[in-house]
Image (cartoon, rainbow, N blue to C red):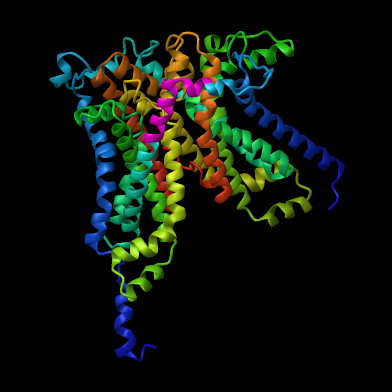
């Protein structure tokens, strides 16, 4: 098909506009491409001379920074295991049993999960956690996130399980499997892609979270990396920019890796589609 | 088939009502999730209402033995004498409304719509690069984003002022001079990806023949957008607006850039709630703020779910 001149000019204008907006989005992040590899990085944009990995060595020599990354990992993995397991079981029950009031349960769960946001419920969450004696523990963060992420996780997984034909489990049961066996040996392997989506989504949510650990944790040895980074640049007077730049990049890597994984495997539409 | 009642009639009927999981097993499967959601989502909803009628504090005697104070917390929040003053609830509520209007409904939605329309027609590599940066702004952890903008806006060295200087414009200390517009631009930048992705997938669900027919008739891109694209994705636009309104209303991320300051000028209700409860230690008053936030969330959620229900029926 041949383009007319005005259409051609229009196309170029569209491309230029799209590229311009893309550049505007890239600008605030540009600094992160250079500063982590610059031994004398400041808040200004500068091309490293020479490029170095020295900042990363400094980060891994800082016990507090390493501990915080480790804490992030404990809290995220703990939360992910709970959300993955509990959501799979619950979604399977919502999809495959004929419990009365299933639809109502789902509706109420969705309603509550969108009404009770972290920033609206910070006071009662803090009070519940302190009534349970869990303030300043990993478990507090893990349980709070499990509760908060579960409704959406269950909803995503229920839709996923609904789309799988029942005949898989039925034929297993005709062959003599019990319902529980049919779930673990037949349904579970088929549901796995759905579980992966929910697990990745929960991990990214917990890993990146700030407010909940910020209010529930107090001591340095429980803090996740998000709170550590915030305290590095807000409380420490003049921030140690070199350390912070490299540390922020390390902290972002799992999220970037998971994003690439999901977009390679499923196309990115799934990713964080419904944020808590 | 139906004239063979002895062999196929019986099992067929059974299959129809057959649930793979008995009610008992179903209840067991639901229990772990049910408990977690009950304790950390449903109980907080009711507890916050209860606490909002007490004078509970974080420290001191009222921490252990809070007293019932009726509507005192609500009356303090809505005290007409200082309602609109900086650092008070009314100021914060109006600020949040402006923030939602400017950064979500105008910023994110319009920019998302524009981007979604643009990437339909541009060459794939332009589309790929643009989408990558827009989505990067959305997926990176909020603390990293907060620090990135802190560096970006730095008065002496920041990238933005360097850029302004290179085209001959005067530098500015934007976090001090225009804090509100900083968080508006910040939140637009942070969240535009969601609207872009939603609208992109909506546009790509429109049959290409509609646009081809318009091309034959010599329609311009604007005409195609106005007369074909926009009317056909109306449902998606409503969904998008409700979701980004709720998220922007509840967001705490600007705190990482401005701490609610300078002098309360970026204190959104979420940040106000944090300050009252965890800096001033007034849990009762903080709970009352929480209740009002949840009521507003409830209104949006009911609208959203009722639209969703209509669609599925």
Q: Which residues are magenta?
A: A58-74
Q: Is residue B218 left or right of residue B58?
A: right
Residue B132 image point, x, y percent: 63, 37
Report which quarter residue A99 is drawn in: bottom left
Residue B252 visible in the current orientation: no
Q: Is residue B126 left or right of residue A101?
A: right
Residue A273 image point, x, y percent: 49, 43
Q: Is residue A61 magenta?
A: yes
Residue A118 image point, x, y percent: 35, 31
Q: Residue at x 73, y 54 (%)?
A: B212
Q: Residue at x 20, y 21 (%)?
A: B71
* Residue furthest bottom in the image: B3
Placement of A172 over or under B78, stated as above or below: below
Placement of A66 over or under B246, stated as above or below: above
Q: Is residue B38 left or right of residue B96?
A: left
| The C terminus of chain A sits in image quarter | top left
Number of numbered discs on residues: 0
Q: Is residue B81 magenta?
A: no
The residue nearer to you, when weighing A48 against A127, is A48
Residue A117 image point, x, y percent: 36, 33
The residue nearer to you, when weighing B272 against A52, is A52
Q: Main secondary structure of the magenta part?
A: helix
Residue A22 visible in the current orientation: yes
């Amino acid at each position: 098909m041949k383009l007319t001149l005005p259409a051609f000019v229009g196309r170029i204008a569209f491309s230029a506009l799209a590229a311009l907006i893309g550049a505007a989005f890239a600008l605030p992040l540009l600094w992160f491409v250079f500063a982590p590899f610059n031994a004398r990085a400041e808040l200004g944009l500068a091309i490293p001379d020479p490029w170095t990995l020295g900042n990363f060595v400094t980060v891994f020599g800082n016990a507090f920074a390493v501990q915080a990354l480790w804490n992030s990992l404990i809290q995220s993995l703990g939360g992910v295991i709970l959300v993955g397991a509990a959501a799979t079981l619950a979604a399977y029950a919502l999809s495959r049993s004929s419990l009365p009031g299933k639809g109502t349960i789902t509706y109420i769960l969705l309603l509550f999960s969108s009404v009770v946001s972290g920033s609206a419920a910070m006071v009662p969450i803090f009070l519940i956690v302190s009534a349970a004696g869990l303030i300043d523990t990993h478990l507090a963060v893990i349980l709070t996130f499990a509760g908060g992420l579960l409704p959406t996780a269950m909803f995503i997984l229920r839709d996923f399980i609904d789309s799988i034909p029942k005949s898989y489990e039925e034929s297993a049961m005709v062959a003599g499997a019990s319902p529980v066996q049919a779930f673990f040996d037949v349904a579970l392997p088929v549901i796995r892609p759905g579980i992966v989506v929910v697990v990745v989504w929960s991990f990214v949510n917990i890993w990146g979270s700030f407010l909940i650990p910020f209010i529930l944790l107090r001591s340095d040895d429980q803090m996740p990396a998000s709170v550590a980074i915030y305290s590095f640049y807000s409380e420490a007077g003049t921030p140690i920019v070199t350390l912070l730049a490299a540390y922020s990049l390390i902290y972002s890597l799992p999220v970037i890796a998971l994003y690439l994984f999901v977009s390679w495997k499923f196309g990115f539409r799934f990713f964080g589609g419904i944020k808590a | 088939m139906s004239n063979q009642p002895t062999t196929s009639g019986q099992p067929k009927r059974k299959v129809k009502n057959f649930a793979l999981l008995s009610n008992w097993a179903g209840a067991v499967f639901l229990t772990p999730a049910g408990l977690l959601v009950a304790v950390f989502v449903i109980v907080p909803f009711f507890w916050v209402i209860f606490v909002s009628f007490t004078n509970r504090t974080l420290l001191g005697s009222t921490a252990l033995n809070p007293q019932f104070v009726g509507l005192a917390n609500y009356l303090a929040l809505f005290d007409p004498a200082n309602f609109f003053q900086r650092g008070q609830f009314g100021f914060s509520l109006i600020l949040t409304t402006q923030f939602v209007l400017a950064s979500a409904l105008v910023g994110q939605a319009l920019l998302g719509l524009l981007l979604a329309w643009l990437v339909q027609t541009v060459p794939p590599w332009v589309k790929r690069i643009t989408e990558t940066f827009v989505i990067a702004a959305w997926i990176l952890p909020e603390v990293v984003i907060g620090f990135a903008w802190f560096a970006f806006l730095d008065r002496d060295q920041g990238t933005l002022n360097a850029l302004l200087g290179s085209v001959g414009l005067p530098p500015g200390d934007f976090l001090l001079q225009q804090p509100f517009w900083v968080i508006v631009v910040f939140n637009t930048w942070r969240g535009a990806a969601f609207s872009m992705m939603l609208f992109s997938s909506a546009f790509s669900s429109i049959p290409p023949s509609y646009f081809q027919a318009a091309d034959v008739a010599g329609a311009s891109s604007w005409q195609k957008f106005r007369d074909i694209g926009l009317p056909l994705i109306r449902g998606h636009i409503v969904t998008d607006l409700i979701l980004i309104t709720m998220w922007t209303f509840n967001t705490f991320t600007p705190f990482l850039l401005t701490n609610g300051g300078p002098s309360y000028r970026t204190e959104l209700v979420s940040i106000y709630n944090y300050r009252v409860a965890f800096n001033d230690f007034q849990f009762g008053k903080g709970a009352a703020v929480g209740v009002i936030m949840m009521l507003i969330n409830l209104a949006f959620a009911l609208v959203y779910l009722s639209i969703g229900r209509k669609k599925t029926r």
